[in-house]
Image: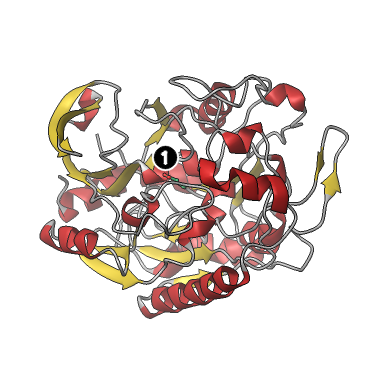
Amino acid sequence: MLSRAALVLRTRATAAPTLAAVPRRTKGTLSRRNKASLAAIDCDDDELPVVNSHNEFDPLEEVIVGRVDDATIPPYDIAGKSVWPEKYHEMFKTKAGQPFPADLMKNAAIELDNFAAILEAEGVKVRRPEVTKGDFSNSFETPDFKSQCGLYCAMPRDVLMVVGNEIIEAPMAWRSRYFEYRPYRKLIKEYFHEGAKWTTAPKPQMSDELYDQDYVEGIDQYSTTEFEPTFDAAEFTRIGKDIFTQRSQVTNEFGIEWMRRHLGDDYNIHVLDFKDKNAMHIDGTFVPIGPGKLLVNPKRPCVTGKKQMSYLYDGESRDYCLPDMFKGWDIFVAQTPELPASHPLFFTSPWTASCNVVMLDHERVVVEAHETKTIEQFEAWGFKPVKVPFRNFLPFGGSFHCATVDIRRRGALESYF
Ligand code: ABU
């Protein structure tokens, strides 16, 4: 594990290229740049670019938190079939275009506001997307497909990826998510005017060729084809110069290759394979929580690389593999979620309740307030849990990591391996 002193030293060594790459756009940007020194992790706020995030754990300064307003049940299709829990398939078939249950919408909105207030109290600046009635509940059509409705802007992590000073809008795989970037555009334009880079990955056509209509669930079976690049931003998790991803139901090899070429030689993109037939997003499966520290989902072990450890899950001993580069890392096995089996979860497994955490720095971790075993475990590992109730939000498909995207973390681009 890196000491803080080592972190600062390494940061100094890698700072200059990052700074040189920042575009000069506005007067405000120039004065920011003139003062800028990205040399140390503990530099003043003023010295950082407005968008600056290289990993999942450096001190968080600014974040976008999603909203559930106008959240709409999307239509059943093959892409959804490959990930949605079977017991809700009927809901997607019969209630598409309608709002989610009113009590959940109301209480999830309250939980999001409370989460935002807690983040502010922890010293994090919170920004929110702007959503208008009809943004998601209206139908839409492109030359290639029609959709009965959109989905929501509850999960900024799925659509926006921040790599250093750049915001990348993801070419997400679900038709219902085609226009999901819109509620964030006002914020993105503001960040751009303040000096951030702004990229939209090639917009997918989403014609029928993108979907395998013969898809059946199984190992290495995917509902998306290689017709064009597609990925969700939550499929990439950042550990400085090394970024980890997986082929999933929403992220194809074409999309991963686009990201590799786009980011270029400053980054290494690593593709891992997990035991997960319904894979969608790496942030409920493989979660960096500090330099040299990884939280892993015991139900979905990594099968890439060599055995790094064994652990007990469901009464059985299991192996967790990792590439050699993780030798010496602390691997923390997540607790099985305590969420009752009857709790509605329309899009995902219950594992987001214990795995989909967000780090406020190398110690403070935002944890779902009802997950007492997870809280105790984080304390025993030496972290400081910040407890936030989020059970009404979970049905929408994620937890704290999904519901946020970090805009600025205090720190610079480093290699942790
Ligand atoms: N970002 C959502 C993760 C979903 C899951 O791991 O079940």
- In the rendering, at what x and y percent does residue 380 appear? 11, 60
Rendered position, 317 above or below 111? above
- In the rendering, at what x and y percent does residue 136 appear? 74, 58
- In the rendering, at what x and y percent does residue 56 appear? 36, 51
* Residue indicated by mark 1: 282
Quarter of image, res 389 = bottom left
Q: Which amino acid type corresponds to the residue marked 1 in the rendered image?
A: Ile
- In the rendering, at what x and y percent does residue 223 appear? 59, 26
Secondary structure of the residue carrying tag 1 is helix
Quarter of image, res 292 = top left
Rendered position, 402 above or below 379? above
Q: Foreground: 327 or 198? A: 327
- Give the position of the N terminus as an image quadrant: top left
- Give the position of the C terminus as an image quadrant: top left
Horizontal side of 26 relative to 113 (left or right) equals: right
Q: Foreground: 313 or 258? A: 313
